[in-house]
Image (cartoon, coloured by chain):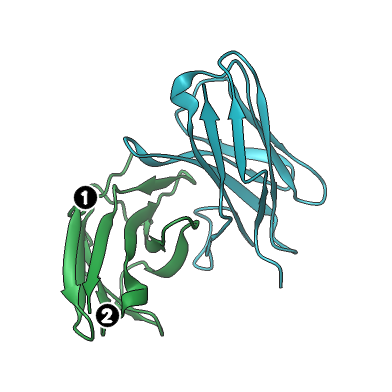
Chain colours: A cyan, B green
Amino acid sequence: KAGVTQTPRYLIKTRGQQVTLSCSPISGHRSVSWYQQTPGQGLQFLFEYFSETQRNKGNFPGRFSGRQFSNSRSEMNVSTLELGDSALYLCASSLVQVGSSTNEKLFFGSGTQLSVL
Amino acid sequence: DAKTTQPNSMESNEEEPVHLPCNHSTISGTDYIHWYRQLPSQGPEYVIHGLTSNVNNRMASLAIAEDRKSSTLILHRATLRDAAVYYCILSTNDYKLSFGAGTTVTVRA
C-alpha cells in the first residue's frame, strides 16, 4: 500500500509570492491534515479536511488556505509569502476525522521543505 | 488549548528501557493521548495511543496516570533505530491536535 505522498519535496520562493503544496493520502483515507514544523515553534496544526470540507483550523492567518478534492487529495496554498513561512510542511492522512474515534492513527508524509528568501 | 510538557532530551544505552514522561495537566475527559516519533528527514510515525487504560503494542507501552494528568511512554529495550524525537500529543474533543515540543532520544551503543 502506497504511503502519503507530498510534492514537491523542496521549494524555494521569494517574499510576496504564493505557493501551492500537494498531498496524496493513502488510498481509502478521507481525512487530510496539514502541519507546519519549524525549529522555533515545533509542530503546529494548520487545518484538516474531511470529505472535501475543512473541519477545523489552527491559529494561522488567512494567507494559509487549503482544499480537498473528491479523490481525497489535498492542496495547501500560502499567499503573500513571508520569511517566517520558511518551514517543513507536513500532511497526514487517516481513515477518520482527527479526534473522532479510537482508531485515529495518522500517517504522515515526508513533507515539503519551503524556503522563503 | 490543551498543552503537553516533555523534557527536551533523554539518553539511554542500547538494550536498556527508556521511560519518556509527558505532563498534560489540562487534559479533559475525552482527550486521547498519542505518541509519535520522528526520525531525521522523515515525517512523524505513529507509536501508540490511549485514553485511560495502559496500552501495549509491539513498539512500546503507554502508562497513563490514574488522574490522566501525565503519561509515560516506555521503550522496553532501546535500539539505535529508536533514536528520534518523540512527541506526546493530545487529540482534543474540538478535533484539534496539540503537540508538545518533543523529547530527543539519544541511544548509545
Q: Is residue A48 above or below residue B81?
A: above
Foreground of the two, B93 or B101: B101
Residue found 71% across the figure and 68% down from its top: A2
Q: Position of residue B5 (x, y in %)?
A: 21, 50
- Which quadrant does the N terminus of chain A fall into? bottom right
* Front-most of residues B29 and A46: A46
B22 above or below A55?
below
The answer to whether B66 appears left or right of A107 in the picture is left
**In the figure, residue A81 lies in which quadrant?**
top right
Q: Which residue is mark 1?
A: B5
Q: Residue at x 30, y 80 (%)?
A: B79
For the question of whether residue A40 can be seen, the reply is: yes
- Under mark 2, the amino acid is Ala
Q: Badge 1 sits on which subunit?
A: B
Left or right of residue B92, residue A105 in this image: right
Query: Circle 2 sits on which residue?
Result: B78
Q: Are there few (<14), some (14-19), or many (20+) residues within 10 Å of tag 2?
A: many
Q: Position of residue B38 (x, y in %)?
A: 41, 60
Callout 1 secondary element: loop
Q: How many marks?
A: 2
Q: Is residue B23 above or below residue B96?
A: below
Contact? badges 1 and 2 (CB < 8 Å):
no
